[in-house]
Image (spheres, rainbow, N blue to C red):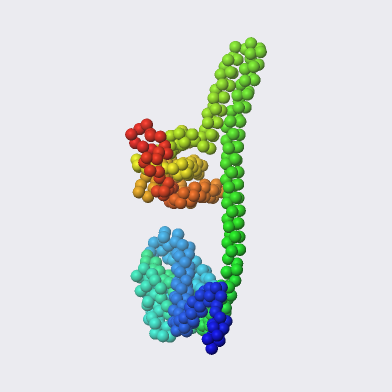
């Protein structure tokens, strides 16, 4: 007997994979059973609430449509009404003619009653025109004209009642929107029939009932698919993760290549637009000096001096391009002096007022953080120069308990107002974000029509202890960042 029980237990024992599968699917099966029970209890309540919300939304849309129609009519007659006196009968006649001609759809039209209850405009039901309809009620005893006049006197609003459709002469529910032309004591309005809304709601109720009946079938199908998915997901997980990793690696490689090509293009443009032209000028001056020397022209030294001046300018351009690629002052003196030099050069080159401020903090930035913040400042100033149309820029770098922050503020037009063809908010901001992501920091960009604020923060992990100096002491009492 003991051997029999042991054999049965051995056969019923689950493998490790079967235990994992059971542990994964059992909560799912229980959850599906609970969902089925909840759906049984709440399906009708949810359907009823859904239908009422649909009805409210459709009626709200109809009301907004009415308001737009009346706004168009008010705009059409505005020039006449606004310039007419209260007793200008000619202007009133023109307005009634214009409103009579403004019909839309099968049953849409504008109507006008004076405050005494006389109908002045009713293009689709002309039998109303010229008669007094005070005290008129619909089939349910709802006041029509009296309420319209009261609503117009109070400034405008909506009213609903039953009315005959001009196209079919069948009675249907109608919603009107009315405003008052107070100078002329007129009630101007337009209406729309909502029988299509009621039909839509009825169709929605029928559709909801059908969906409730199909819900259980869907639950069973979803359960089967989910169980199958759990089984297959384990087999495909490693392959999917490997494909995602390969895709990210390809995207990163493409991004690196794009960045390299962009930097090469920028350097090539700098060399072509500045140094190449300067050297061509120097060559011309040297050739001119040689000719003058051969002919004994006393102006030869003047040409040599201009050539030397051109070479000096080329040397300065080479230094500037070199500083853009990798500023020596960043390694020699630190982030503060490097940013100060960058801001001064930016202001001198562009004519934009630029201020820079550092705030004392005890810890120091490591090499990666210094380079990242400097490049972010460089990218931000480039965007300001090219796109912002700013008059001033303010740069501040300071330390705090959470790390260090670089803030660049300009008074330009903002990112949203710039030409999207210029690429603002694209590659430049992506470069900033990628640099700050490598440091596990944060980048915030706040932009409006009054300017843009870019704030880059690095965490405390990139701050060196006071005894570990990443920069030599600054010559001034205040320490740089």
From the viewer's side, name the closer residue of 261 and 448.
261
Residue sitting at the far bottom? 1
- Res. 302 image quadrant: top right
Q: Does residue 274 sit above or below 295 in this rendering?
A: below
| Residue at the (57%, 78%) spot, across then down | 224
Residue 427 in view:
yes
Residue 214 position, x and y percent, is 55, 82
Residue 313 position, x and y percent, is 54, 27
| Residue at the (34%, 36%) spot, across then down | 478
From the viewer's side, name the closer residue of 324 and 133.
324
Count of numbered labels shown in the rendering: 0
- Res. 396 image quadrant: top left
Q: In the image, 35: left or right of 301?
A: left
State which quarter of the image contains the N terminus.
Answer: bottom right
From the viewer's side, name the closer residue of 238 and 49.
238
Q: Does residue 471 sit above or below 149 in this rendering?
A: above
Residue 111 in view:
no
Q: In the image, 156: left or right of 231?
A: left
Residue 451 position, x and y percent, is 43, 47
Q: Does residue 478 sit above or below 100 in this rendering?
A: above
| Residue at the (60%, 37%) spot, across then down | 268
| Residue at the (39%, 85%) spot, across then down | 141
Residue 333 position, x and y percent, is 43, 34
From the viewer's side, name the closer residue of 79 and 189.
189
């Amino acid at each position: 007997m003991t051997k029999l029980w042991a054999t049965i237990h051995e056969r019923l024992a689950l493998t490790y994979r079967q235990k994992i599968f059971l542990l994964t699917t059992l909560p799912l099966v229980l959850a599906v059973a609970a969902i089925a029970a909840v759906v049984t209890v709440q399906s009708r309540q949810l359907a009823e609430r859904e239908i009422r919300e649909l009805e409210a939304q459709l009626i709200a849309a109809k009301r907004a449509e009415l308001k737009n129609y009346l706004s168009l009519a008010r705009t059409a007659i505005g020039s006449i009404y606004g310039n007419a006196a209260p007793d200008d009968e000619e202007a009133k006649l023109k307005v009634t003619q214009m409103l009579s001609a403004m019909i839309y759809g099968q049953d849409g039209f504008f109507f006008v009653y004076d405050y005494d209850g006389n109908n002045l405009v009713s293009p689709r039901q002309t039998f109303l025109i010229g008669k007094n309809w005070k005290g008129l009620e619909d089939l349910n005893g709802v006041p029509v004209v009296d309420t319209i006049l009261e609503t117009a006197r109070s400034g405008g609003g909506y009213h609903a009642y039953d009315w005959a459709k001009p196209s079919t002469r069948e009675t249907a529910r109608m919603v009107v929107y009315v405003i008052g032309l107070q100078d002329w004591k007129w009630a101007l309005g337009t209406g729309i029939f909502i029988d299509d809304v009621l039909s839509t709601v009825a169709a929605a109720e029928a559709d909801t009932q059908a969906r409730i009946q199909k819900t259980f079938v869907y639950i069973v199908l979803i359960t089967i698919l989910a169980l199958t998915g759990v089984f297959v997901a384990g087999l495909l997980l490693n392959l999917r993760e490997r494909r995602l990793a390969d895709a990210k690696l390809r995207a990163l490689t493409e991004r690196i290549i794009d960045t390299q090509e962009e930097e090469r293009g920028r350097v090539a443009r700098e060399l072509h637009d500045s140094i190449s032209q300067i050297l061509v000028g120097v060559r011309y001056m040297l050739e001119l000096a040689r000719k003058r020397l051969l002919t004994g022209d006393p102006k030869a030294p003047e040409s040599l001096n201009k050539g030397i001046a051109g070479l000096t300018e080329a040397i300065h351009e080479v230094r500037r391009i070199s500083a853009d690629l990798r500023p020596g002052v960043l390694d020699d003196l630190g982030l503060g002096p490097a940013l100060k030099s960058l801001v001064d050069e930016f202001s001198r080159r562009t004519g934009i007022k630029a201020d820079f401020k550092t705030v004392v903090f005890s810890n120091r930035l490591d090499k990666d953080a210094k380079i990242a913040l400097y490049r972010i400042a460089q990218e931000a100033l480039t965007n300001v120069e090219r796109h912002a149309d700013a008059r001033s820029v303010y740069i501040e770098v300071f330390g705090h308990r959470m790390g260090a922050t670089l803030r660049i503020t300009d008074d330009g037009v903002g990112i949203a107002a710039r030409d999207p063809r210029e690429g603002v908010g694209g590659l430049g901001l992506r470069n900033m974000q990628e640099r700050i992501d490598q440091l596990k920091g944060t980048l915030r960009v706040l932009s409006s029509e009054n300017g843009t604020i870019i704030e880059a923060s690095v965490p405390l992990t990139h701050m060196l202890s006071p005894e570990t100096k990443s920069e030599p002491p600054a010559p001034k009492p205040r320490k740089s960042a």
